Amino acid sequence: MKLSKPKYIFVTGGVASSLGKGIISSSIARLLQARGYSVTIQKLDPYINVDPGTLNPYEHGECYVTEDGTETDLDLGHYERFTNHPTSRANNVTTGRIYKSVIEKERKGEYLGKTVQVIPHITDEIKRRIQLLGQQKIYDVIITEIGGTVGDIESLPFIESVRQLRYQLGVKNTCLVHLTLIPYLAASGELKTKPTQHSVKALLENGLQPDILVLRTEHPLSADLKRKVALFCNVDANAVMESIDVPTIYEVPLKMHEQHLDEVVLSKLDMPADQEPDMDAWRDFVERVKNPTKVIKIALVGKYTELPDAYKSISESFVHAGAVNKCKVKLCYVNSEKLTEANIGETLGGMNGILVAPGFGNRGIEGKILGVKYARENNIPFLGICLGMQCAVIEFARNVLGWTDANSVEMETKTTHPVIDLMEEQKEVTAKGGTMRLGAYPCTLRRGSKVAEAYGKLNISERHRHRYEFNSEYRDQFEAAGMKTVGTNPETGLVEVVEIPELRWFIGTQYHPEYKSTVHNPSPLFVAFVKAALEYSEEKK
Ligand code: GLN
């Protein structure tokens, strides 16, 4: 930490959702970091779920898991991928979590005699949560992204808290960045600023004046248009940024730096801008992403394939691993519910690698098992993650060990071969939220295994999100038949990694390597998987 007191940046959005507030927040963080400041990003989500752990991925995309085992919004994945710095429970706050703690305090009698109200009790709790990260005395800058769109009823308490905080902390200690959309009307060939003006008016009605506007657009914005927006919205002309669609999200920090967004932020916050940001490694990474020398195809077999956001960390891990291998990974989403013996050859035949995705429940499970079988029988590089690893175990039990009814107890409680069983510690658990085996645990790898080769070491730590595990009673039979348990938890012996050494590259992990992959620290397992797929594609030629 360089500063004596932390500074706060708030990022809000207007006009439409999905404008990329998470990417803009991450880009600001990356640029400030590159200037030597320590930065963390926090997301405030307006929904009433305490955390997104109980949400179907179709609602808000993937549930991201932090080191400390908090189930969070997928934007936290972007924060970590951009900043290469871990987030934690304090980095994701929902309306549900706020109300839960206020109601718990009320029940304990902490507000005795008082009427508990949105203002000041809910807003006080929101302000407390925003400042918690600042109190850690590690960060110069705390960026708080407010989920939802300005004007939504449900985000009002967050907006009101920002208003109060800006007043209490002082203007020079806070900065408000507002993201909007400049739509293009093809019929008249015009870019329209009115929605932005209205969105800023909505903020003003709530007592907030943005310092910086970031305008999402599909077409370049003229200086005149930016001046007009500046004039109508009371911001400096140099504080109106164009955020045009780019081929890769990782280019956004560079685009923002070209327009001096980082300098403008620093000057609004009265922070010295003496050090130019060192973005060389980042620029090099973006160049690799944009100029691959080869292309490989990897199938992602899962049941949420209609919404690629459901597998965000996996797809981003492939971008990172592709850059290391100087190749573009074309991810082909394969709906496991539609996979059959009849169509599997034409669906997976042309693939250079097959990944079977994490997931829960019965739907699409047989298709996933078929996907594993196809990879194993055709010796195609394979990575199974969490449920994907469990499917690899089930497939091996059924088709190699000959236990035709082998299954996971999650799918079939009456199976005579429960090769995947409920973890002992889960047997008493009935509540759903935050009760799985979550977060980082150590794992010891077997010397000489492909997984140990991938990591280049024997002791690793990866993140988890599961209730079921490899049933260790069957360990010897699997080992004897050729599926090796090459990664285990050093304390409990829980099987974390399986591998079939006689195949080209066939690995299943109970943990999720995708959660830890960042631009500066790509997941070694994804890097090795892409390398194996690349070698296989060369061999096939
Ligand atoms: N449903 C499986 C379990 O709970 C796998 C979970 C996952 O893939 N994240 O163990």
Image (cartoon, rainbow, N blue to C red):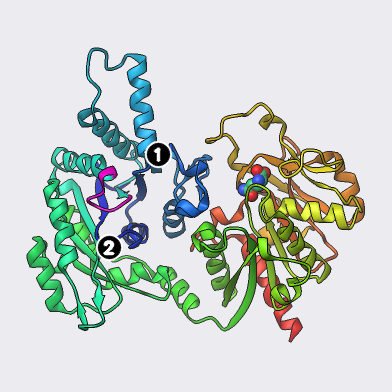
Query: Mark 1 is on which residue type?
Result: Ala
Q: Position of residue 137 (x, y in %)?
A: 33, 39
Does the segment drawn in magenta span residue 429? no
Q: Position of residue 95 (x, y in %)?
A: 35, 38
Q: Give me the residue at 30% from left, 76% from top.
A: 218
Name the residue furthest bottom: 541
The kind of secondary structure element at disc 2 is loop
Mark closest to the chain's N terminus, 2 or 1: 1
Q: Residue 168's image quarter? A: top left
Q: Give me the residue at 60% from left, 74% from top.
A: 325
The kind of secondary structure element at disc 1 is helix
Q: Nearer the viewer, mark 2 or mark 1?
A: 1
Q: Give me the residue at 76% from left, 82% from top.
A: 539
Q: Which residue is mark 1?
A: 90
- Front residue of 336/359: it is 336
Q: Can see residue 6?
A: no
- Front residue of 164/102: it is 102
Query: Mark 2 is on which residue type?
Result: Gln
Q: Does residue 149 appear left or right of residue 480 in this picture?
A: left
How many residues crowd mark 1 within 10 Å: few (<14), some (14–19), many (20+)?
some
Q: CA distance from mark 2 to mark 1?
A: 29 Å
| Main secondary structure type of the part rendered in magenta | loop
How many residues crowd mark 2 within 10 Å: few (<14), some (14–19), many (20+)?
few
Which segment did they paint magenta? 147-154
Q: Can see residue 298?
A: yes
- Front residue of 266/195: it is 195
Q: Which residue is mark 2?
A: 275
